[in-house]
Image: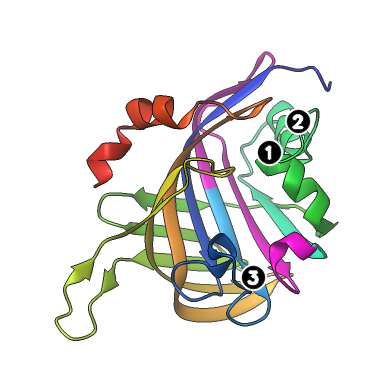
């Protein structure tokens, strides 16, 4: 299993309880002292060995008592009911860090997440528009989250803020936005006008599937500027 070749490419949306800008990405502790929220991603193109992963959608609510690198995290995975048994096995193998190098996204989360809550199989509504900085994740009775552009408090004009991480481990570039989220499942939270970001991603057995320069061409990242 550890040698299974895989590739995921798609769209990523995240929310956390910190102020807009995500202190964890800027050498600062979480705004509230802890970090909780929800992530969601749509796999537009992918496989795990012979298993087709195109169209698979994954969401997860999470809680970390301190900055995420201190560990002690809780996570509740969510998959759509139509996800096949083979796809489910692939998702949990990959998200469990199977055979992946130290410092890659899922290997890191396999270490810092210590408690996995009962996985849920429920409809996931996922909306993502990176250029307009709009997004939405909704899972009935578990979580609702919406993304809107950051606005100037005086003029009410939209403000574009981007995170650029040429050595990133989740994404290379993201549009930063304002997020409102409420978790009502095992992991509970309720906040508005906190951090949200939208990005594209591509992962494989080695972590990030493409170099920064390759990703810029693949995703047209310059068009976000």
Residue corresponding to mark 3: 36
Residue occupying image coordinates x 62% and y 66% = 142
Badge 3: residue crowd in 10 Å (few <14, some 14–19, many ≥20): many
Q: Residue furthest front?
A: 27
Under tag 1, what secondary structure? Answer: loop
Q: Is residue 106 left or right of residue 160?
A: right
Residue occupying image coordinates x 51% and y 72% = 181
Closer to us: mark 1 or mark 3?
Answer: 1
Q: Is residue 109 left or right of residue 31?
A: right
Residue corresponding to mark 2: 100
Question: Could one spot residue 123 in this view of the protein?
Answer: yes
Closer to us: mark 2 or mark 3?
Answer: 2
Q: Is residue 100 left or right of residue 202?
A: right
Q: Characterize the magenta stretch by its predominant secondary structure.
A: strand
Which residues, given as a range, are shown in magenta? 41-70
Q: Is residue 126 above or below residue 3?
A: below
The answer to which quarter of the image holds residue 196 is bottom left
Distance from the alpha carbon under mark 1 to that under mark 3: 21 Å
Residue corresponding to mark 1: 104
Colour pattern? rainbow
Q: Is residue 162 above or below residue 83?
A: below
Residue 137 pos. (x, y %): 48, 58
Residue 19 pos. (x, y %): 48, 76
Distance from the alpha carbon under mark 2 to that under mark 1: 7 Å
Under tag 2, what secondary structure? Answer: loop
Badge 1: residue crowd in 10 Å (few <14, some 14–19, many ≥20): some
The stretch drawn in magenta includes residue 49:
yes
Q: Are marks 2 and 1 in contact (CB under 8 Å)?
A: yes
Q: Is residue 69 left or right of residue 165?
A: right
Residue occupying image coordinates x 74% and y 49% = 109
């Amino acid at each position: 299993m550890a040698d299974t070749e895989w590739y995921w490419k798609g769209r990523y949306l995240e929310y956390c309880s910190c102020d807009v800008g995500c202190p964890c990405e800027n050498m600062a502790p979480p705004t509230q002292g802890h970090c909780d929220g929800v992530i969601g991603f749509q796999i537009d193109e992918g496989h795990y060995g012979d298993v087709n992963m195109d169209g698979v959608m994954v969401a997860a609510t999470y809680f970390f008592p301190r900055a995420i690198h201190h560990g002690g995290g809780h996570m509740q995975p969510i998959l759509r009911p139509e996800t096949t048994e083979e796809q489910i096995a692939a998702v949990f193998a990959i998200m469990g860090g199977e055979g992946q190098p130290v410092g890659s996204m899922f290997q890191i989360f396999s270490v810092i997440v210590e408690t996995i809550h009962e996985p849920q199989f429920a409809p996931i509504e996922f909306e993502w528009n990176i250029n307009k900085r709009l997004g939405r994740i909704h899972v009935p009775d578990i979580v609702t989250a919406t993304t809107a552009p950051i606005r100037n408090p005086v003029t009410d004009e939209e403000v574009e803020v981007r995170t650029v991480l040429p050595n990133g481990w989740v994404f290379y570039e993201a549009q930063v936005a304002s997020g409102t989220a409420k978790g009502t499942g095992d992991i509970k939270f309720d906040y508005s006008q906190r951090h949200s970001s939208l990005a594209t991603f591509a992962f494989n057995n080695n972590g990030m599937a493409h170099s920064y320069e390759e990703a810029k061409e693949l995703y047209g990242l310059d068009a976000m500027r």
